[in-house]
Image (cartoon, rainbow, N blue to C red):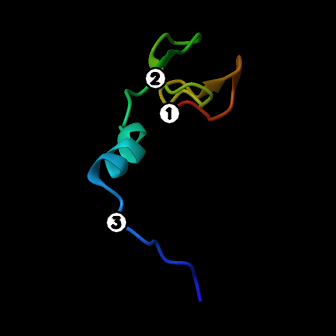
Amino acid sequence: MPPLPKKKHSKKRQGGRSAHNAIGRITLAECPQCHSARLPHRVCPSCGYYNGREVVPAE
């Protein structure tokens, strides 16, 4: 049989636990090839380059 809590946790305790769950802003990096905004450590969606070489063929 699993252990059960003896008393109810307060709203302050619940709020303090979920205080770090806020969604932050998206971090964008500049593509060194075409200078458009892209997610860091991802292939650039506009030019298809990553780490100085073409990974995805350009459309």
Among the 4 quarters of the image, the one containing residue 51? top right
Q: Position of residue 23 (x, y in %)?
A: 36, 37
Circles 3 and 1: CB distance less than 8 Å?
A: no
In the picture of the structure, the residue carrying the numbered disc 1 is 59
In the picture of the structure, the residue carrying the numbered disc 3 is 8
In the picture of the structure, the residue carrying the numbered disc 2 is 27
Q: Check the image and report above or below for 48 versus 22.
A: above
Q: CA distance from mark 3 to mark 1?
A: 58 Å
Q: Check the image and report above or below for 43 versus 15.
A: above
Among the 4 quarters of the image, the one containing residue 42? top right
Q: Give 57 or 19, whichever is nearer the viewer.
A: 19
Q: Residue at (47%, 26%) from the top-left corner?
A: 46
Q: Residues within 10 Å of mark 2 (few under 14, many from 20)?
A: few
Q: Check the image and report above or below for 37 versus 59.
A: above
Q: Residue at (49%, 10%) from the top-left corner?
A: 35
**Residue that sits furthest to the bottom in the current view:** 1
